[in-house]
Image (cartoon, rainbow, N blue to C red):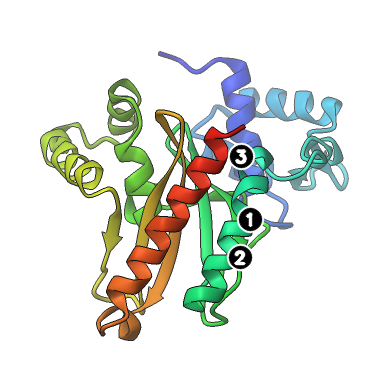
Amino acid sequence: MEPSSIEKACKILLLLSEVDDKPLSLGEIAELMAMNSSTCAYMMKCLLRCGLAEQDGPRKGYRLGSVAFSITRNGPYRKDIVRKAQPFMEELAVEINETIILVGIHQGLRILLHIIDGNPEVKMRRDKLLLPGTYATATGKLLLAHLPLEERLRWLRELGENEKRDEIEAEFARIRADGCCVLNAPLSQFVQVAFPVREGEEVAAALAVPVPRQRFENTERDDIIACARRTAEKIGKSLAAT
């Protein structure tokens, strides 16, 4: 089905949000969006009129406009979850001396909700709301595993991985049965550990700890996993109490 004009405009805004302050030319936007140049020019005129995009001058590149930034003036995304989670995340960071990350998901995209610093070796940008690599991360796999089946199948179609459906669904079933996702990528310095944060019957977010490989492979592993699991459960109980 052909995307609507609104969908196209939203995807352009997402594209502009991912390129920092580097303006994109009309040609670059059209190419990256696989869009006809005249259609792209019309869409950009609409976004400029609304203040959602801006341009330094004629034939100059485009960036996000002031109105796009003002939309977020009410604070972090899902601040209802962040407000409840923050004190428990802070406790966990002190307890295990690691950085704690809270991530949500919307339409197959990971969304950074909150970070508590605990390990200076972990470097994460705080100015990026949308995080790349949903299926390549522990938080992404865990959150995808708990999506309703219809949403998971739509994500698979968009990813172009329908032929791997049975394999991926089996992996998701294991994650749901284990109640966590541990991603131990051989070339990474960190092992990613993620746990579901439940809001009633639904998984509202994933609580994650990137653990240095050296710590994860010694006797501290079980303690770290147990502490993180308890914290995710505490946040869930706090959410249920509202």
* 51 horizontally vs 33: left or right: right
Q: Are marks 2 and 1 in contact (CB under 8 Å)?
A: yes
**What's the distance in space between the residues labelled 2 and 1, CA to CA?**
6 Å
* Residue in the picture at 62% in, 35% down: 12
What label does residue 90 carry, if any? Answer: 2
Residue 163 locus on image (x, y percent): 14, 34
* 165 horizontally vs 45: left or right: left
**What's the distance in space between the residues labelled 3 and 1, CA to CA?**
27 Å
Q: Quadrant of the C terminus?
A: top right
Q: Are marks 2 and 3 in contact (CB under 8 Å)?
A: no
* Residue in the picture at 52% in, 64% down: 100
Quadrant in the picture for residue 146: top left
Between circles 2 and 3, the one closer to the viewer is 2
Q: Amino acid at mark 3?
A: Leu
Q: Amino acid at mark 1?
A: Gln
Among the two numbered marks 3 and 1 on one chain, the one whose residue lies closer to the N terminus: 3
Residues 206 and 239: in front is 239
Instruction: Tell me the element at label 2.
Output: helix
Q: What residue did someone put label 1 on?
A: 86
* 236 horizontally vs 183: left or right: right
Q: Amino acid at mark 2?
A: Glu
Q: What residue did someone put label 3 on?
A: 14
